[in-house]
Amino acid sequence: MQGLDFSIVPEYWPLIGKGLWWTVVISTASAVLSVLAGIGFALLVLYAPPVVRYPVRLFMWLFMGTPLLLQLFLIYFGLVQIGIDIPAIWSGIVALSLHFAVYNADIFRAGIASLDKGQTEAARSLGFGAWRTRIYIVVPQAVRGTVPAVGNMMIALLKESSIVSMIGIAELVHSAQLVISETYRPFEFYLTAAALYYGLNLILEAVLRGIERKVELSR
Amino acid sequence: MNDTRPMIEVRGARKFFGPLEVLKGIDFSVARGQIVAVIGPSGSGKSTLLRSINHLETLDGGEVWLDGVQVNQKLDRRSFERHINGVRQQMGMVFQHFNLFPHLSVAENITIAPIKLKGMAKAEARALALKMLDKVGLADKIDAFPARLSGGQKQRVAIARALAMQPKVMLFDEATSALDPELVDEVNLVMKQLASEHMTMVIVTHEMRFAAEVADRVIFMADGAVVEEGSPAELFRNPKQERTRSFLKKFLNG
Protein backbone atom coordinates (compact mmCIF):
# COMPACT_ATOMS: atom_id res chain seq x y z
CA MET A 1 0.00 0.00 0.00
CA GLN A 2 1.10 3.43 -0.97
CA GLY A 3 0.05 6.36 1.30
CA LEU A 4 -1.21 9.68 0.06
CA ASP A 5 1.63 12.03 -0.80
CA PHE A 6 0.79 15.41 -2.25
CA SER A 7 4.38 16.63 -2.24
CA ILE A 8 4.65 15.26 -5.76
CA VAL A 9 1.96 17.62 -7.10
CA PRO A 10 3.94 20.88 -7.47
CA GLU A 11 6.41 19.22 -9.79
CA TYR A 12 3.64 18.58 -12.31
CA TRP A 13 1.97 21.94 -11.85
CA PRO A 14 2.89 23.26 -15.34
CA LEU A 15 0.89 20.45 -16.96
CA ILE A 16 -2.00 20.62 -14.52
CA GLY A 17 -2.05 24.42 -14.83
CA LYS A 18 -2.29 24.18 -18.59
CA GLY A 19 -5.22 21.78 -18.22
CA LEU A 20 -6.87 24.19 -15.81
CA TRP A 21 -6.36 26.99 -18.32
CA TRP A 22 -8.07 25.03 -21.11
CA THR A 23 -10.95 24.11 -18.85
CA VAL A 24 -11.44 27.81 -18.08
CA VAL A 25 -11.16 28.84 -21.74
CA ILE A 26 -13.49 26.16 -23.07
CA SER A 27 -16.03 26.63 -20.28
CA THR A 28 -16.06 30.41 -20.58
CA ALA A 29 -16.43 30.40 -24.34
CA SER A 30 -19.14 27.73 -24.19
CA ALA A 31 -20.98 29.52 -21.39
CA VAL A 32 -21.14 32.80 -23.31
CA LEU A 33 -22.12 31.11 -26.56
CA SER A 34 -24.72 28.90 -24.88
CA VAL A 35 -26.41 31.91 -23.32
CA LEU A 36 -26.45 33.89 -26.57
CA ALA A 37 -27.60 30.90 -28.61
CA GLY A 38 -30.14 30.06 -25.89
CA ILE A 39 -31.70 33.53 -26.18
CA GLY A 40 -31.69 33.16 -29.96
CA PHE A 41 -33.35 29.74 -29.87
CA ALA A 42 -35.95 30.94 -27.37
CA LEU A 43 -36.87 33.91 -29.59
CA LEU A 44 -37.06 31.71 -32.68
CA VAL A 45 -39.17 29.09 -30.96
CA LEU A 46 -41.55 31.75 -29.64
CA TYR A 47 -41.76 34.20 -32.49
CA ALA A 48 -40.27 32.94 -35.77
CA PRO A 49 -42.53 31.88 -38.63
CA PRO A 50 -43.35 28.15 -38.69
CA VAL A 51 -40.75 27.30 -41.36
CA VAL A 52 -38.05 28.34 -38.90
CA ARG A 53 -39.79 27.58 -35.64
CA TYR A 54 -40.45 23.89 -36.23
CA PRO A 55 -36.94 22.97 -37.41
CA VAL A 56 -35.52 24.77 -34.36
CA ARG A 57 -37.91 22.91 -32.09
CA LEU A 58 -36.96 19.61 -33.71
CA PHE A 59 -33.28 20.43 -33.29
CA MET A 60 -33.79 21.32 -29.61
CA TRP A 61 -35.78 18.17 -29.04
CA LEU A 62 -33.06 16.02 -30.63
CA PHE A 63 -30.33 17.71 -28.61
CA MET A 64 -32.21 17.26 -25.37
CA GLY A 65 -32.74 13.58 -26.10
CA THR A 66 -29.15 12.58 -26.75
CA PRO A 67 -26.04 12.45 -24.56
CA LEU A 68 -23.46 15.22 -24.72
CA LEU A 69 -20.74 12.67 -25.39
CA LEU A 70 -22.53 11.41 -28.47
CA GLN A 71 -23.07 14.97 -29.71
CA LEU A 72 -19.38 15.66 -29.24
CA PHE A 73 -18.42 12.56 -31.22
CA LEU A 74 -20.88 13.42 -33.98
CA ILE A 75 -19.40 16.90 -34.32
CA TYR A 76 -15.76 15.88 -34.09
CA PHE A 77 -15.65 12.45 -35.74
CA GLY A 78 -18.89 12.47 -37.70
CA LEU A 79 -18.85 15.76 -39.55
CA VAL A 80 -15.41 15.07 -41.06
CA GLN A 81 -17.05 12.38 -43.12
CA ILE A 82 -19.17 14.95 -44.90
CA GLY A 83 -16.25 17.29 -45.33
CA ILE A 84 -16.71 19.48 -42.27
CA ASP A 85 -13.48 19.31 -40.32
CA ILE A 86 -13.70 21.24 -37.07
CA PRO A 87 -10.58 21.32 -34.85
CA ALA A 88 -10.92 19.52 -31.53
CA ILE A 89 -11.07 22.64 -29.36
CA TRP A 90 -13.82 24.13 -31.50
CA SER A 91 -15.70 20.84 -31.66
CA GLY A 92 -15.67 20.80 -27.88
CA ILE A 93 -16.87 24.39 -27.63
CA VAL A 94 -19.59 23.85 -30.26
CA ALA A 95 -20.87 20.67 -28.59
CA LEU A 96 -20.94 22.21 -25.10
CA SER A 97 -22.48 25.46 -26.39
CA LEU A 98 -25.27 23.76 -28.30
CA HIS A 99 -25.96 21.21 -25.60
CA PHE A 100 -26.43 23.88 -22.95
CA ALA A 101 -28.01 26.41 -25.32
CA VAL A 102 -30.93 24.04 -25.67
CA TYR A 103 -31.49 23.97 -21.91
CA ASN A 104 -30.93 27.72 -21.61
CA ALA A 105 -33.44 28.29 -24.39
CA ASP A 106 -36.06 26.40 -22.44
CA ILE A 107 -35.34 28.48 -19.34
CA PHE A 108 -35.47 31.74 -21.30
CA ARG A 109 -38.66 30.67 -23.03
CA ALA A 110 -40.33 30.06 -19.67
CA GLY A 111 -38.95 33.37 -18.39
CA ILE A 112 -40.38 35.25 -21.34
CA ALA A 113 -43.72 33.50 -21.04
CA SER A 114 -43.98 34.42 -17.36
CA LEU A 115 -43.55 38.15 -17.99
CA ASP A 116 -46.56 40.33 -17.30
CA LYS A 117 -48.50 41.11 -20.48
CA GLY A 118 -48.68 44.72 -19.32
CA GLN A 119 -44.98 45.14 -20.09
CA THR A 120 -45.52 44.33 -23.74
CA GLU A 121 -48.65 46.47 -23.88
CA ALA A 122 -46.86 49.45 -22.36
CA ALA A 123 -44.06 49.19 -24.91
CA ARG A 124 -46.47 48.71 -27.81
CA SER A 125 -48.57 51.65 -26.66
CA LEU A 126 -45.48 53.86 -26.83
CA GLY A 127 -45.03 52.83 -30.46
CA PHE A 128 -42.43 50.07 -30.16
CA GLY A 129 -42.81 47.38 -32.81
CA ALA A 130 -43.05 43.72 -31.92
CA TRP A 131 -39.32 42.97 -32.30
CA ARG A 132 -38.13 46.14 -30.62
CA THR A 133 -40.45 45.38 -27.72
CA ARG A 134 -38.83 41.97 -27.40
CA ILE A 135 -35.30 43.31 -27.63
CA TYR A 136 -35.60 46.32 -25.33
CA ILE A 137 -38.27 45.24 -22.88
CA VAL A 138 -38.97 41.51 -22.89
CA VAL A 139 -35.54 39.89 -23.25
CA PRO A 140 -33.71 42.11 -20.73
CA GLN A 141 -36.32 41.32 -18.09
CA ALA A 142 -36.53 37.63 -18.94
CA VAL A 143 -32.74 37.31 -18.79
CA ARG A 144 -32.67 39.01 -15.39
CA GLY A 145 -35.33 36.70 -14.02
CA THR A 146 -33.55 33.60 -15.18
CA VAL A 147 -30.05 34.34 -13.87
CA PRO A 148 -30.30 31.77 -11.03
CA ALA A 149 -31.53 28.94 -13.28
CA VAL A 150 -29.10 29.69 -16.09
CA GLY A 151 -26.36 30.04 -13.48
CA ASN A 152 -27.00 26.48 -12.36
CA MET A 153 -26.66 25.40 -15.97
CA MET A 154 -23.30 27.17 -16.17
CA ILE A 155 -22.08 25.33 -13.08
CA ALA A 156 -23.09 22.07 -14.76
CA LEU A 157 -21.36 23.20 -17.95
CA LEU A 158 -18.10 23.85 -16.12
CA LYS A 159 -18.10 20.30 -14.78
CA GLU A 160 -19.35 18.69 -17.98
CA SER A 161 -16.58 20.41 -19.94
CA SER A 162 -14.34 17.54 -18.79
CA ILE A 163 -16.03 15.44 -21.45
CA VAL A 164 -13.91 17.09 -24.17
CA SER A 165 -11.03 15.05 -22.80
CA MET A 166 -12.63 12.25 -24.84
CA ILE A 167 -11.50 13.88 -28.07
CA GLY A 168 -8.00 14.43 -26.81
CA ILE A 169 -8.15 17.96 -25.48
CA ALA A 170 -5.79 18.31 -22.54
CA GLU A 171 -8.18 20.08 -20.19
CA LEU A 172 -8.02 19.53 -16.46
CA VAL A 173 -9.15 15.89 -16.25
CA HIS A 174 -7.13 14.85 -19.26
CA SER A 175 -4.01 16.59 -17.92
CA ALA A 176 -4.46 14.78 -14.63
CA GLN A 177 -4.69 11.51 -16.50
CA LEU A 178 -1.51 12.27 -18.42
CA VAL A 179 0.32 12.99 -15.20
CA ILE A 180 -1.10 9.87 -13.58
CA SER A 181 0.08 7.70 -16.46
CA GLU A 182 3.59 8.91 -15.68
CA THR A 183 3.49 8.92 -11.89
CA TYR A 184 0.98 6.16 -11.08
CA ARG A 185 -0.48 8.42 -8.37
CA PRO A 186 -4.17 8.56 -9.39
CA PHE A 187 -5.59 9.55 -6.03
CA GLU A 188 -3.38 12.61 -5.52
CA PHE A 189 -3.89 14.01 -8.99
CA TYR A 190 -7.58 13.26 -9.29
CA LEU A 191 -8.07 14.91 -5.91
CA THR A 192 -6.01 17.87 -7.09
CA ALA A 193 -8.20 18.16 -10.17
CA ALA A 194 -11.29 17.87 -7.98
CA ALA A 195 -10.04 20.65 -5.73
CA LEU A 196 -9.38 22.86 -8.73
CA TYR A 197 -12.90 22.26 -10.10
CA TYR A 198 -14.24 23.10 -6.71
CA GLY A 199 -12.22 26.31 -6.65
CA LEU A 200 -13.46 27.26 -10.12
CA ASN A 201 -17.01 26.65 -8.99
CA LEU A 202 -16.56 28.90 -5.98
CA ILE A 203 -15.35 31.66 -8.29
CA LEU A 204 -18.19 31.04 -10.74
CA GLU A 205 -20.75 31.13 -7.94
CA ALA A 206 -19.35 34.42 -6.70
CA VAL A 207 -19.55 35.85 -10.21
CA LEU A 208 -23.14 34.62 -10.56
CA ARG A 209 -24.12 36.11 -7.21
CA GLY A 210 -22.60 39.39 -8.34
CA ILE A 211 -24.56 39.32 -11.58
CA GLU A 212 -27.74 38.42 -9.72
CA ARG A 213 -27.34 41.35 -7.36
CA LYS A 214 -26.51 43.69 -10.19
CA VAL A 215 -29.54 42.85 -12.29
CA GLU A 216 -32.04 42.46 -9.46
CA LEU A 217 -35.28 44.19 -10.41
CA SER A 218 -36.06 45.40 -6.91
CA ARG A 219 -33.22 47.85 -6.72
CA MET B 1 -54.83 72.00 -39.49
CA ASN B 2 -58.56 71.56 -39.34
CA ASP B 3 -59.69 72.44 -35.84
CA THR B 4 -63.25 71.29 -36.28
CA ARG B 5 -62.22 67.78 -37.19
CA PRO B 6 -62.60 65.49 -34.16
CA MET B 7 -59.36 64.35 -32.58
CA ILE B 8 -60.77 60.89 -31.95
CA GLU B 9 -63.67 59.37 -33.74
CA VAL B 10 -65.11 55.92 -33.18
CA ARG B 11 -67.79 54.65 -35.52
CA GLY B 12 -69.81 51.50 -35.04
CA ALA B 13 -67.18 49.80 -32.87
CA ARG B 14 -67.94 46.13 -32.35
CA LYS B 15 -65.92 43.57 -30.48
CA PHE B 16 -66.47 39.98 -29.48
CA PHE B 17 -64.67 37.93 -26.87
CA GLY B 18 -65.62 34.50 -28.11
CA PRO B 19 -69.42 34.43 -28.30
CA LEU B 20 -69.74 37.44 -25.98
CA GLU B 21 -70.33 40.78 -27.67
CA VAL B 22 -68.49 43.30 -25.51
CA LEU B 23 -68.88 46.32 -27.78
CA LYS B 24 -72.21 46.53 -29.58
CA GLY B 25 -71.65 49.24 -32.12
CA ILE B 26 -70.27 52.25 -30.29
CA ASP B 27 -70.14 55.73 -31.81
CA PHE B 28 -68.44 58.62 -30.14
CA SER B 29 -66.05 61.40 -30.90
CA VAL B 30 -63.71 63.60 -28.93
CA ALA B 31 -62.95 67.12 -30.06
CA ARG B 32 -59.49 68.62 -29.94
CA GLY B 33 -58.70 69.58 -26.34
CA GLN B 34 -61.82 67.91 -25.03
CA ILE B 35 -61.86 65.68 -21.99
CA VAL B 36 -64.21 62.75 -22.04
CA ALA B 37 -64.81 60.50 -19.08
CA VAL B 38 -66.18 57.02 -19.68
CA ILE B 39 -68.01 55.50 -16.71
CA GLY B 40 -70.02 52.37 -16.20
CA PRO B 41 -70.16 49.11 -14.28
CA SER B 42 -67.29 46.66 -14.66
CA GLY B 43 -67.78 44.48 -17.68
CA SER B 44 -69.52 47.31 -19.51
CA GLY B 45 -66.79 47.36 -22.16
CA LYS B 46 -65.34 50.76 -21.30
CA SER B 47 -61.75 49.53 -20.99
CA THR B 48 -62.07 47.49 -24.16
CA LEU B 49 -63.34 50.59 -25.95
CA LEU B 50 -60.39 52.65 -24.71
CA ARG B 51 -57.89 49.93 -25.64
CA SER B 52 -59.34 49.66 -29.12
CA ILE B 53 -58.60 53.35 -29.70
CA ASN B 54 -54.87 52.60 -29.83
CA HIS B 55 -55.44 49.11 -31.19
CA LEU B 56 -54.39 47.15 -28.12
CA GLU B 57 -57.72 45.49 -28.82
CA THR B 58 -58.57 44.72 -32.43
CA LEU B 59 -62.13 45.66 -33.31
CA ASP B 60 -64.27 43.12 -35.14
CA GLY B 61 -66.23 45.90 -36.79
CA GLY B 62 -66.27 49.66 -37.08
CA GLU B 63 -63.63 52.32 -37.43
CA VAL B 64 -61.34 54.32 -35.19
CA TRP B 65 -59.86 57.60 -36.40
CA LEU B 66 -57.18 59.74 -34.84
CA ASP B 67 -56.93 63.28 -36.13
CA GLY B 68 -58.12 62.34 -39.59
CA VAL B 69 -56.15 59.10 -39.91
CA GLN B 70 -57.85 55.76 -39.63
CA VAL B 71 -56.21 53.75 -36.87
CA ASN B 72 -57.56 50.31 -37.77
CA GLN B 73 -57.18 50.50 -41.52
CA LYS B 74 -56.79 47.38 -43.60
CA LEU B 75 -53.17 46.92 -44.63
CA ASP B 76 -50.88 43.98 -45.13
CA ARG B 77 -49.16 42.89 -41.95
CA ARG B 78 -45.88 44.67 -42.42
CA SER B 79 -47.42 47.97 -43.53
CA PHE B 80 -49.92 47.83 -40.70
CA GLU B 81 -47.16 47.27 -38.14
CA ARG B 82 -45.38 50.39 -39.40
CA HIS B 83 -48.64 52.34 -39.52
CA ILE B 84 -49.78 51.38 -36.02
CA ASN B 85 -46.40 52.08 -34.45
CA GLY B 86 -46.57 55.56 -35.91
CA VAL B 87 -50.14 56.09 -34.73
CA ARG B 88 -49.38 54.86 -31.22
CA GLN B 89 -46.54 57.33 -30.89
CA GLN B 90 -49.22 60.00 -31.06
CA MET B 91 -51.35 58.49 -28.30
CA GLY B 92 -50.19 58.26 -24.71
CA MET B 93 -51.67 55.47 -22.67
CA VAL B 94 -51.74 55.12 -18.90
CA PHE B 95 -52.59 51.73 -17.44
CA GLN B 96 -54.26 50.68 -14.22
CA HIS B 97 -51.15 48.79 -13.13
CA PHE B 98 -48.66 51.45 -14.31
CA ASN B 99 -46.58 48.95 -16.30
CA LEU B 100 -43.33 50.78 -15.73
CA PHE B 101 -40.32 48.87 -17.02
CA PRO B 102 -38.77 47.50 -13.81
CA HIS B 103 -35.32 46.96 -15.32
CA LEU B 104 -34.96 50.61 -16.27
CA SER B 105 -34.50 53.67 -14.11
CA VAL B 106 -37.17 56.37 -14.05
CA ALA B 107 -35.11 58.41 -16.52
CA GLU B 108 -34.70 55.41 -18.84
CA ASN B 109 -38.39 54.55 -18.62
CA ILE B 110 -39.16 58.01 -19.94
CA THR B 111 -36.35 58.34 -22.47
CA ILE B 112 -36.31 54.90 -24.08
CA ALA B 113 -39.14 55.67 -26.50
CA PRO B 114 -37.90 59.13 -27.59
CA ILE B 115 -34.36 57.76 -28.02
CA LYS B 116 -35.19 54.50 -29.77
CA LEU B 117 -38.22 55.61 -31.75
CA LYS B 118 -37.55 59.24 -32.50
CA GLY B 119 -33.75 59.10 -32.58
CA MET B 120 -33.47 61.77 -29.90
CA ALA B 121 -29.98 62.38 -28.50
CA LYS B 122 -29.45 61.03 -24.98
CA ALA B 123 -28.73 64.39 -23.38
CA GLU B 124 -31.74 65.96 -25.00
CA ALA B 125 -33.93 63.05 -23.93
CA ARG B 126 -32.74 63.36 -20.35
CA ALA B 127 -33.54 67.05 -20.34
CA LEU B 128 -36.98 66.16 -21.65
CA ALA B 129 -37.39 63.51 -18.94
CA LEU B 130 -36.49 66.07 -16.31
CA LYS B 131 -39.05 68.49 -17.71
CA MET B 132 -41.76 65.83 -17.72
CA LEU B 133 -40.86 64.69 -14.22
CA ASP B 134 -41.02 68.27 -13.07
CA LYS B 135 -44.53 68.41 -14.47
CA VAL B 136 -45.60 65.44 -12.36
CA GLY B 137 -43.60 66.63 -9.34
CA LEU B 138 -40.99 63.87 -9.32
CA ALA B 139 -37.84 65.50 -10.67
CA ASP B 140 -35.93 64.22 -7.62
CA LYS B 141 -36.70 60.59 -8.58
CA ILE B 142 -35.07 60.75 -12.00
CA ASP B 143 -32.43 58.11 -11.17
CA ALA B 144 -34.57 55.91 -8.93
CA PHE B 145 -35.82 52.51 -10.02
CA PRO B 146 -39.55 51.76 -10.18
CA ALA B 147 -39.41 49.28 -7.30
CA ARG B 148 -38.47 52.16 -4.99
CA LEU B 149 -41.54 54.24 -5.83
CA SER B 150 -45.02 54.29 -4.27
CA GLY B 151 -47.98 53.43 -6.46
CA GLY B 152 -48.88 57.07 -6.90
CA GLN B 153 -45.33 57.94 -7.87
CA LYS B 154 -45.21 55.04 -10.33
CA GLN B 155 -48.37 56.23 -12.00
CA ARG B 156 -47.03 59.79 -12.23
CA VAL B 157 -43.85 58.45 -13.86
CA ALA B 158 -46.02 56.44 -16.25
CA ILE B 159 -47.83 59.66 -17.17
CA ALA B 160 -44.49 61.43 -17.67
CA ARG B 161 -43.34 58.52 -19.87
CA ALA B 162 -46.41 58.86 -22.07
CA LEU B 163 -46.12 62.66 -22.23
CA ALA B 164 -42.47 62.47 -23.31
CA MET B 165 -43.64 61.26 -26.72
CA GLN B 166 -45.61 64.49 -27.05
CA PRO B 167 -48.84 62.70 -27.87
CA LYS B 168 -51.92 64.29 -29.39
CA VAL B 169 -54.17 62.50 -26.96
CA MET B 170 -53.88 60.75 -23.62
CA LEU B 171 -55.83 57.62 -22.78
CA PHE B 172 -56.29 56.73 -19.11
CA ASP B 173 -57.43 53.20 -18.30
CA GLU B 174 -58.58 53.35 -14.67
CA ALA B 175 -55.38 55.11 -13.76
CA THR B 176 -56.19 55.34 -10.05
CA SER B 177 -58.06 52.07 -9.49
CA ALA B 178 -55.04 50.16 -8.25
CA LEU B 179 -53.91 52.90 -5.88
CA ASP B 180 -54.35 53.16 -2.14
CA PRO B 181 -56.99 55.83 -1.46
CA GLU B 182 -54.50 58.30 -0.04
CA LEU B 183 -52.43 58.15 -3.26
CA VAL B 184 -55.30 58.83 -5.64
CA ASP B 185 -55.24 62.61 -5.27
CA GLU B 186 -51.64 63.10 -6.42
CA VAL B 187 -52.43 61.33 -9.67
CA ASN B 188 -55.73 63.14 -10.13
CA LEU B 189 -53.92 66.41 -9.60
CA VAL B 190 -51.55 65.67 -12.46
CA MET B 191 -54.48 64.74 -14.70
CA LYS B 192 -56.27 67.96 -13.80
CA GLN B 193 -53.19 69.93 -14.66
CA LEU B 194 -53.07 68.23 -18.06
CA ALA B 195 -56.71 69.12 -18.50
CA SER B 196 -55.92 72.75 -17.82
CA GLU B 197 -53.31 72.58 -20.57
CA HIS B 198 -56.02 71.44 -23.01
CA MET B 199 -54.65 67.98 -23.57
CA THR B 200 -57.22 65.83 -25.34
CA MET B 201 -58.04 63.03 -22.93
CA VAL B 202 -60.23 59.98 -22.66
CA ILE B 203 -60.50 58.83 -19.10
CA VAL B 204 -62.01 55.52 -18.11
CA THR B 205 -62.71 55.81 -14.41
CA HIS B 206 -64.68 54.60 -11.41
CA GLU B 207 -64.41 57.94 -9.71
CA MET B 208 -67.58 59.87 -10.33
CA ARG B 209 -66.46 62.95 -8.44
CA PHE B 210 -63.26 63.23 -10.44
CA ALA B 211 -65.14 62.66 -13.69
CA ALA B 212 -67.58 65.41 -12.77
CA GLU B 213 -64.78 67.80 -11.93
CA VAL B 214 -62.50 67.28 -14.88
CA ALA B 215 -64.55 66.07 -17.84
CA ASP B 216 -66.25 68.17 -20.49
CA ARG B 217 -68.41 65.23 -21.39
CA VAL B 218 -69.31 62.00 -19.66
CA ILE B 219 -70.25 58.78 -21.40
CA PHE B 220 -72.12 56.14 -19.45
CA MET B 221 -71.70 52.63 -20.83
CA ALA B 222 -73.40 49.40 -19.87
CA ASP B 223 -73.39 45.97 -21.50
CA GLY B 224 -71.23 47.06 -24.41
CA ALA B 225 -73.35 50.03 -25.41
CA VAL B 226 -73.47 53.75 -24.69
CA VAL B 227 -76.53 54.26 -22.55
CA GLU B 228 -76.30 57.98 -22.15
CA GLU B 229 -73.87 60.82 -22.63
CA GLY B 230 -73.81 64.48 -21.80
CA SER B 231 -72.15 67.18 -19.78
CA PRO B 232 -71.26 66.17 -16.23
CA ALA B 233 -74.01 68.43 -14.93
CA GLU B 234 -76.65 66.77 -17.11
CA LEU B 235 -75.51 63.24 -16.63
CA PHE B 236 -74.85 63.32 -12.90
CA ARG B 237 -77.67 65.65 -11.79
CA ASN B 238 -80.32 64.77 -14.25
CA PRO B 239 -79.78 61.38 -15.87
CA LYS B 240 -82.44 60.53 -18.42
CA GLN B 241 -82.06 56.77 -18.51
CA GLU B 242 -83.21 54.46 -15.75
CA ARG B 243 -80.02 52.43 -16.17
CA THR B 244 -77.88 55.50 -15.54
CA ARG B 245 -79.96 56.49 -12.53
CA SER B 246 -79.65 53.10 -10.85
CA PHE B 247 -75.89 52.97 -11.52
CA LEU B 248 -75.33 56.44 -10.09
CA LYS B 249 -77.57 55.75 -7.11
CA LYS B 250 -75.50 52.72 -6.21
CA PHE B 251 -72.35 54.83 -6.40
CA LEU B 252 -73.68 57.77 -4.44
CA ASN B 253 -75.09 55.56 -1.71
CA GLY B 254 -72.03 53.33 -1.66
Image (cartoon, rainbow, N blue to C red):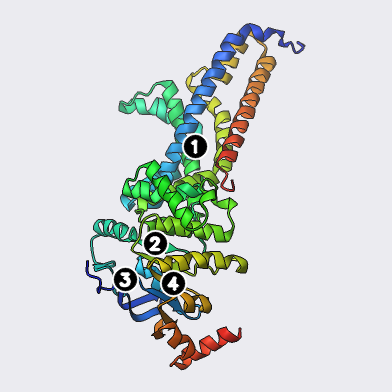
Q: Amino acid at mark 4?
A: Ile
Q: Earlier in the sequence, mark 3 or mark 4?
A: 3
Specify whether residue A35 is in view: yes
Measured Cα–Cα span from mark 4 to mark 1: 49 Å
Residue at which label 1 appears: A100
Q: Amino acid at mark 2?
A: Gly
Vertical comparison of B4 with B190: above or below: below
Residue at which label 2 appears: B92
Measured Cα–Cα span from mark 2 to mark 1: 42 Å
Residue at which label 4 appears: B203
Taking the spot 63% from the left edge, 21% from the top edge, the residue there is: A196
Specify whether residue B99 is in view: no
Measured Cα–Cα span from mark 2 to mark 3: 15 Å
Q: Amino acid at mark 1?
A: Phe
Q: Earlier in the sequence, mark 2 or mark 3?
A: 3
> In the image, are marks 3 and 4 on the same chain?
yes
Marks 1 and 3: in contact by CB < 8 Å? no
Q: Nearer the viewer, residue A158 or B49?
A: B49
Quadrant of the drawing holding the N terminus of chain A: top right
Marks 1 and 2: in contact by CB < 8 Å? no
Vertical comparison of B45 with B75: above or below: below
Q: Nearer the viewer, residue A80 or A175?
A: A175
Q: Taking B56 as reference, is B133 left or right?
A: right
Measured Cα–Cα span from mark 3 to mark 4: 15 Å
Dot in front, 2 or 1? 2
* Chain designation of label 1: A
Measured Cα–Cα span from mark 3 to mark 1: 56 Å
Residue at which label 3 appears: B32
